Amino acid sequence: VLLIFSEAIIEFFKIKKNPSVSVSESLLNFRNWYGVLIITIASIIGFYWLSTKMEKFAEALDDQDNFIKEFLSNFLPGNEITGAVVVKILIMTLIVRIAFRAYLKMHQGKNEVKESLKLLLESKIIKSNSHFSLSSNDDLANLKKHNQSLKNLENKNNGLAKENLSMLIAIINSLIKTKDIITAKSTSEIHLTFLENRINKRFSESKVAQSTLPLLGFAGTIIGIMIAMGGMAGALKPDADPVELIKTIKSLSVAFDTTLVAVICAFIVRSKERKLLNDTSDLLIEREEIIESGLFSKFSK
């Protein structure tokens, strides 16, 4: 649980620092020092916890007939509800991780568009107040210089920022070769379609999460109930302690927690998706306005 959540937090800050970085597919990136650090801390905590149990474990070994009972009662959180608790922890961790990963992907998509817009606004040709005539050789020569500076900037970037710079280069190349603004605008539309497809991929994981999370929660509930019902068989024996029956029935409530957490996480993912999708759509509209007012408006035949 510690490893999974730590990895999620690390990914969040990696994306915040560099929106074009890919979300890691592995549990942890062992090449990074913080991955090693987290595993070390988790190991220290685990060994310390085990050391506090070793004395009781040694005592349990002396009583072979009662070994399993003593082992469960000392090493796990209650032998009556151990199975349900373990299932709950594992499935809840998976549910929260899937939800957080879906959010990370959407957040990354929005940040990529935001950073690429920032780069567009900082490009010399967008910032320039110059007007270019496509019939003027001097203006075409200036355009080629702008194109070269964009290529140099393109080599220093990656991800969506690089794609946007590639779009600007393609538009200017089209203007230089065809001297036709309409043809250049069609080049921009092709890049916009590519951009929208890229953003849709970032948001596709949230769709999967919204359908997967409730199923995982329901599966956790069913498994938890089956485990609790298995314990109830012993608690219903004539000579069983009534307290044991109460504990077993109480464990049933543990099973339903996974469904509740799954539904809440799915609702949060859905609400975040709506907000981030609206924000991203606004950024894409702003991008088109920048291209139109900051680039195409500066050209004439």
Image (tube, helix red, strand yellow):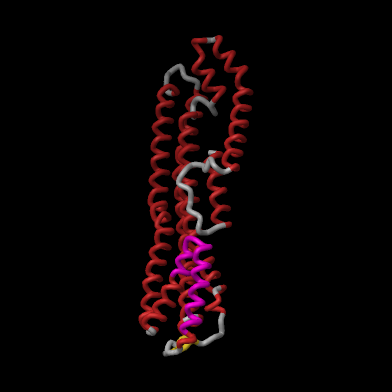
Residue at 46% from the left image edge and 16% from the top image edge: 239
x, y (%) of residue 199? 43, 63
Residue at 52% from the left image edge and 70% from the top image edge: 117
Query: How many labels were placed on the picture?
Result: 0
Name the image quarter holding the C terminus. Answer: bottom left
> Magenta part of the protein: which range?
140-166
Report whether residue 264 is seen: no
- Compared to residue 61, the image places residue 112 above or below, namely below
Magenta stretch, main secondary structure class: helix
* Nearer to us in this view, 107 or 268: 107
- Compared to residue 224, the image places residue 192 above or below, namely below
Residue at 54% from the left image edge and 55% from the top image edge: 15
Report whether residue 207 is seen: yes
Which quadrant holds residue 185?
bottom left
x, y (%) of residue 130? 54, 86
In reply to whether residue 147 is colored magenta, the answer given is: yes
In reply to whether residue 279 is colored magenta, the answer given is: no
x, y (%) of residue 299? 46, 86
Residue at 39% from the left image edge and 32% from the top image edge: 226
Left or right, 178 with respect to 288, comes to left
* Nearer to us in this view, 95 or 292: 292
- Compared to residue 165, the image places residue 14 above or below, namely above
x, y (%) of residue 39? 57, 36
